[in-house]
Image (tube, rainbow, N blue to C red):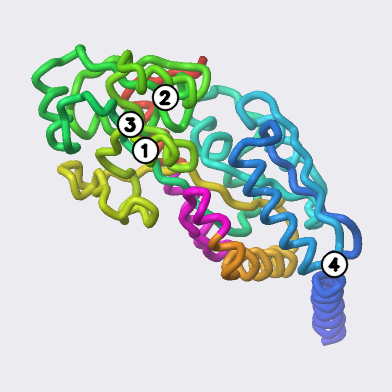
Amino acid sequence: MRFIAAFAIGCFFLLAQSVAAAQAYPNKPVRIIVPFSPGGPTDIVARVVGQKLSEAFEKPVVIDNRAGAGGTLGASMVAKSAPDGYTLLLCSSGPTVVSPGLQDKMPYDTLRDFAPITLVLSFPYLLMVNPSFPAQSVKELIAIAQAKPGQLNYGSAGTGTAGHLASELFRSMTKTNMVHVPYKGASVAAVDLISGQLQLLLEPAASALPRVRGGNVRALGVSSMRRFSLLPDVPTINESGVPGYEASVWYGVCAPAGTPRDIVARLNREIVKQVSSTETKERLVSLGAELATNSPEQFRTFIGNELRKWSRVINETGVKAN
């Protein structure tokens, strides 16, 4: 009985300490690692989240850009950091679920080494062609590609990038034979699409939207399951003859594995609350984003599903990293 009583008291004090730590959190600056260079979409999302968290916590939230190795350098730093809630990762689809399927030796295991906090938002891809291209719909594009195997070129931001895999998924599901042309960035590929040297391109809505609105390219479809709010007349690829097709560039927040559940829950509540505010939501949507917050458990399930999906695409298509 004494042992049981002592054990119960010990558990009570551990629980009390955990609750106290969560209530005191944060008592110093929080750092969000962005595994890419300043100025890109990942950096913009991190600064919006960081600013709102700083206001909510009344503590500085520092954005720390650690680019390198396709985003895995910064991600591995977070995986190895103390699990105390003071070092977070602005995680994205590339280093989180694509790189593990491409690289033989990863510096981290996504599901083992990170504590998912919440998905924040996603950017659908726009399937675009040059305005002079004869296809007026996804179905017409597929018909042309099937009638001319190996004659249509599709671009990407580089071999093994998330956009490349989204294109490979489209090619695989439509049973078309098209030629991949890798570029050093989607914006470079877009230049060749506009000039007519490239026939089609899947580009994230954030960067593609101005080109579509300016009439430089024509959007045939959107890669999300629902129509894109800023281009409601553009049908989804899923509803255009490719049932089940879905791909996006997504962003979320993760902490090192072992971060106390109370701190993870606190971060989840604050991030979801802040990005769901009218002001922040309007700002993010204006960039071409679709808000997609969820619970830590839902985010973990989502990541697991994404890992399996893109690993399957990589294995089936034989894509290799540069």
Which residue is tagged 1? 212
Magenta region: which residues?
283-306
Amino acid type of the residue tagged 3 in the rendering: Val
Q: Nearer the observer, disc 1 or disc 4?
A: 1
Q: Nearer the observer, disc 3 or disc 2?
A: 3
* 4 or 3: tag closer to the N-terminus: 4
Which residue is tagged 3? 217
Along the viewing direction, whichever of 220 and 77 lies nearer the viewer = 220
| Measured Cα–Cα span from mark 1 to mark 2 | 11 Å
Task: Tell me whether circle 1 and circle 4 mark residues in contact (CB < 8 Å).
Answer: no
Amino acid type of the residue tagged 4 in the rendering: Glu
Along the viewing direction, whichever of 285 and 105 lies nearer the viewer = 285
- x and y percentages locating residue 192 in the rendered image: 39, 17
Q: Residues within 10 Å of mark 4 (few under 14, many from 20)?
A: few
Task: Tell me whether circle 3 and circle 2 mark residues in contact (CB < 8 Å).
Answer: yes
* 1 or 4: tag closer to the N-terminus: 4
Q: In the figure, is residue 164 to the left or right of 70?
A: left
Task: Specify the principal SS of the magenta part.
Answer: helix
Q: In the figure, is residue 186 to the left or right of 223?
A: right
Which residue is tagged 2? 190
Q: Residues within 10 Å of mark 3 (few under 14, many from 20)?
A: many
Q: SS for tag 2?
A: helix
- x and y percentages locating residue 56 in the rendered image: 76, 69
| Measured Cα–Cα span from mark 3 to mark 1 | 5 Å
Q: SS for tag 3?
A: loop
Q: SS for tag 1?
A: helix
